[in-house]
Image: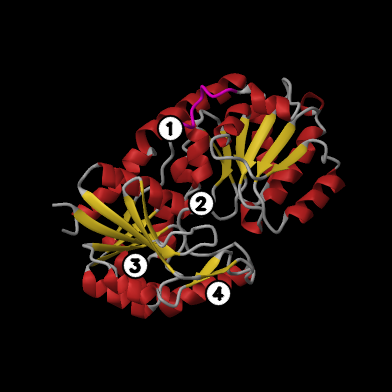
């Protein structure tokens, strides 16, 4: 008899975000194993016309919702209000109710789910610290007011990195907390992808091409990357270097102004709206992937860079050192453009080292961070509660 899992995620397909992708990828593999039946109870989105549908064997139930895209800075959009969520929840029959956003579900909803089956929570993000003063304050206030109580009610807590567990989960809940890392499609992201298409697009030629990927917000630390890149460009051998940043967000204008001040506007490209199938080509094109983040629970982009066989330069923020080891990349202190520049130069000057790191990163991804591995680990979580 199949185990029944009801995934509680306020946003889901056709919305594509980090946690939504995780839920979709491992859920479809659970269904394919024939050991699990999976339902996702989510909000109705503007471009989702059907109340219920089945995708890759996953039953999706959408509750009528109000979609909010403009919110205060400490509440990253989008957000939904679903006044009929509780009646829809009470209709669900499942062995496990799995929450994927601790900020959305009310005590009443959590108590109702707890009465109907085992309660599982995945922390897709960690303790908000160093993001912005407003986000830090309200995020930590939420956990003191309700988040910690929610964790104590859960039968199992899944953390996307050990850092998330240590920084976010109360000590008295550590015994029921486990780490399940996110995954990557190693067939789609791989070192054999065409390298030249994207390089031609940005007229990179044989010059170094650096890549970064993330929302244009303070926590991603892009101002430190631009500062380091501007200094890199002043060196004769890196005069033709290019930097591509994939992402959108409220800091775009500020970052564009920084590029103008640093006189690097012609060498820095901000890109958005890339089709999913084209994204691996950007990784294939780069010589070095850089993530200068200040706060990062478990960055999907690092898994993608590993699978693409690219050397990685990132910071010691959050779960980054758990994903990138010394064989696959270099870790520098966060908010430190000086060290970022030093290691940038060191890696760009050493072709052999970059190739070795890329090959090691690919092996690391294949062994530890595939979606199949992720799905098997989630299956173990559910089965441990039977």
- Which residue is labeled 4 in the image? 138
Please say if the residues under marks 2 and 1 sit with CB atoms less than 8 Å apart.
Answer: no
Element under disc 2: loop
Element under disc 1: loop
Q: Residue 57, percent across and down? A: 31, 47
Q: Is residue 386 found inside the magenta-colored segment of the image?
A: no
Between disc 3 and disc 1, the foreground one is 1
Between disc 4 and disc 2, the foreground one is 2
Instruction: Please indicate whether residue 217 sits to the left or right of residue 154 in the image.
Output: right
- Which residue is labeled 2 in the image? 16
Q: Residue 243, percent across and down? A: 71, 36
Residue 84 or residue 104, whichever sits in front? 84
Q: Earlier in the sequence, mark 3 or mark 1?
A: 3
Span shown in magenta = 186-194
- Give the overall secondary structure of the magenta segment: loop
- Label 1 Cα neighbours within 10 Å, binned few <14 / some 14-19 / many ≥20: some
- Which residue is labeled 3 in the image? 171
Q: Earlier in the sequence, mark 1 or mark 4?
A: 4
Between disc 1 and disc 4, the foreground one is 1
Element under disc 3: helix
Q: Which of marks 4 and 3 is nearer the N terminus?
A: 4
Please say if the residues under marks 4 and 2 sit with CB atoms less than 8 Å apart.
Answer: no
When asked about the image quadrant of residue 183, the answer is top left
Q: Is residue 184 above or below residue 223?
A: above
């Amino acid at each position: 008899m199949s185990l029944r899992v009801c995934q509680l995620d306020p946003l889901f397909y056709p919305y594509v975000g980090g946690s939504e992708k995780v839920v979709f990828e491992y859920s479809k593999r659970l269904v394919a194993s024939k050991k699990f039946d999976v339902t996702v109870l989510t909000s109705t989105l503007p471009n989702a016309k059907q109340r219920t549908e089945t995708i890759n064997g996953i039953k999706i139930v959408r509750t009528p919702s109000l979609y909010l895209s403009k919110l205060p800075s400490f509440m990253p959009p989008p957000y939904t209000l679903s006044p009929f969520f509780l009646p829809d929840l009470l209709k669900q029959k499942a062995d496990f109710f799995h929450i994927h956003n601790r900020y959305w579900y009310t005590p009443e909803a959590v108590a109702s789910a707890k009465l109907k089956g085992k309660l599982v929570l995945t922390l897709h993000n960690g303790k908000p610290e160093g993001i912005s003063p407003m986000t830090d304050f309200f995020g930590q206030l939420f956990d003191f007011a309700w988040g910690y109580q929610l964790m104590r009610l859960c039968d199992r807590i899944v953390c996307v990195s050990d850092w998330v567990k240590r920084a976010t989960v109360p000590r008295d809940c550590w015994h029921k907390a486990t780490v399940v890392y996110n995954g990557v499609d190693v067939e789609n992201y791989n070192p054999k992808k065409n390298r030249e298409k994207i390089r031609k697009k940005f007229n990179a030629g044989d010059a170094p091409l650096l890549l970064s990927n993330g929302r244009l917000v303070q926590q991603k630390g892009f101002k430190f990357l631009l500062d380091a890149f501007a200094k890199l460009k002043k060196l004769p051998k890196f005069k033709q270097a290019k930097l591509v940043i994939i992402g959108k967000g409220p800091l775009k204008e500020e970052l564009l102004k920084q590029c103008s001040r640093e006189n690097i506007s012609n060498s820095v490209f901000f890109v958005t709206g890339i089709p999913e199938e084209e994204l691996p080509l950007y990784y294939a094109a780069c010589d070095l992937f850089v993530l200068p983040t200040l706060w990062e629970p478990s960055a999907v982009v690092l898994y993608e860079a590993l699978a693409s066989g690219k050397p990685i330069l990132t910071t010691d923020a959050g779960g980054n050192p758990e994903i990138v080891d010394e064989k696959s990349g270099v870790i520098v202190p966060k908010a430190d453009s000086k060290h970022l520049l030093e290691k940038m130069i060191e890696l760009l000057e050493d072709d052999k080292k970059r190739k070795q790191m890329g090959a090691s990163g690919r092996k690391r991804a294949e062994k530890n961070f595939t979606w199949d591995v992720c799905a098997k680990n989630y299956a173990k979580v559910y089965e441990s509660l039977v």
